[in-house]
Image (cartoon, rainbow, N blue to C red):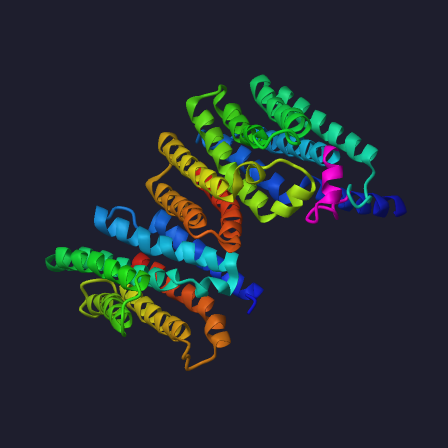
Amino acid sequence: MKITPLNRVLLLSTCLLAGYQVVAGIDGLENVPTIAYTIAFGVLVMAGLMIIILGYDAFDSPVVVIVSTIIPLSLSLGLVWEHSSAMRFTYLAFTILGLLVVMLTRSLSVPGRLATIVLALVHGVAGMVVFLLPSILAAQGRMAPGFGLVGLGGALIGLGGLLLSFLKTGRPIVSREIILGILPGLLLLMTIAFVSGFALA
Amino acid sequence: MLILRQSIARIRTYIPLIKTLQTGLLLSTGVAGYLSAHTSADMGLLVGLTTSLLLAISGSTILNMWYDHDIDTVMNRTHNRPLAAGRVSLKEALWLGLVLSLAGASWALVINLLYGLVVFTGLFFDVVVYTIWLKRRTSWSVVWGGISGGMPILAGRVLAVGQIDFIGLLLMTAVLFWIPTHTLTFCIHYFDDYRAARVPTFVSDYGFEATRAIIALSAIVAAASIAVAGVMIGVQAGALRLMAVLSSGLLLLSFASVFRPSDRANFSLFKYASVYMLASMILLSL
């Protein structure tokens, strides 16, 4: 399936917006969240560029699963580090271990459904943190209402992850063409939500 | 009116002679070299730099194409170029290349003597040393081609600071070592073309594996040089962060090409390398 010019524009916009966030959106934070957000938005930049360069073939790479885990993991680490100081080191350990286990189970041929369970657990926890933490903080008035948009981004990343996993398992509820057709738009919407959410915080 | 139409049509025929993407990328390095000084930019100088570099780079590219027209005829990828396909005569291309090169180098010399000398050196290395002397003799010609490719950024820097400084040389080194990620990946992808044209390349001399390793090593040096230059220039932290992200991408693709070699990995690196260089130049200018 060929990538359409519109989707190229959407992907390029995603790259530019995520690149802007790395350059100008995360100044003045502590080291860990700065690194975490740089990784999250940096991976978004790279993912967008690789889809533009390789086309939808990029999704056939086994690295996609790991890359799509890095984004919510590092974003959630940044959020936890900034807004839940009691959980900082526990969540840092979860992030590092989670990523390592996902990488290991994806690289080695592990028996049964272990790889899927590990991925669902790590991706699920990270996704819930990105969705819930900003939404709760915004709802409680501890952060500006606009910060809730980061939670919306978390919901969109969850949707994207779900679509990608349908694609990878070969059992999509909608066709591959539809999934690939809407992913660039979804990536852009997600990035807009994150960038504007952080800006409005 | 007819003459005007004919002239426009002729110019359109000439445009492919200057390899617009490659020329544009080299031009962007020159502008970035100038802006890297972070002094208040003199618009007159900037226009002079852009125009003189555009003329010199275009001229040398046309002379390169003029000299290599026989190779282009043999190679599948290039047989449809204006000279190889006969749409532009050899004499016409030679004159056009000479006029543009001389105009570019002269203009550069008028703007600033040292800047002009750097531009002229780049032109000389590209046309005489790389194209005429070494390209058909040794695969190591790419080093000299790389040096000439690094001259626009050095020239831009020289024009801004008035001397050849360490940062300028570092920026030139970055381009020199970036070039294998661009040219050697290309040689791998079009290996059969180069073999048919009997042009020695690293692939034909040392094999695919060694060439991929050289590309990866070059990428490390290029990324490190750009990073150090960025820090020394005083590029803002955010731009450095994005530069680190983009450099990681370059390194990951280079290593992927070594450890999981495939034409897809190789050509992805080739395409990504151009985006990387353009983005790095923009970031260095911030």
Q: Residue furthest bottom?
A: A173
Residue A51 in view: yes
Residue at 84 percent of width and 48 percent of height: B5
Name the spot of residue B133 as percent of width and height, x first: 66, 25
Residue B276 as seen in the image, left or right of residue A31: right
Residue at 78 percent of width and 45 percent of height: B13
Q: Residue furthest right?
A: B2
Q: Which sits in the foreground, A133 or A47?
A: A47
Q: Give the range drawn in magenta.
A: B67-82
In the figure, residue A134 lies in which quadrant? Answer: bottom left
Residue B143 as seen in the image, left or right of residue A125: right
Name above or below for residue B95 compared with residue B75: above
Name the spot of residue A109 as percent of width and height, x first: 31, 65
Residue A196 in view: no
Classify the position of the C terminus of chain A by image quarter. bottom left
Q: Which sits in the foreground, B88 or A80?
A: B88
Classify the position of the N terminus of chain A by image quarter. bottom right
Name above or below for residue A27 compared with residue B222: below
Q: Which sits in the foreground, A89 or B35?
A: A89
Q: Is residue A55 magenta?
A: no
Q: Residue furthest top?
A: B113
Q: Which sits in the foreground, A62 or B17?
A: A62
Name the spot of residue A181 as percent of width and height, x first: 50, 71
Name the spot of residue B91 as percent of width and height, x first: 83, 32
The total number of labels drawn is 0
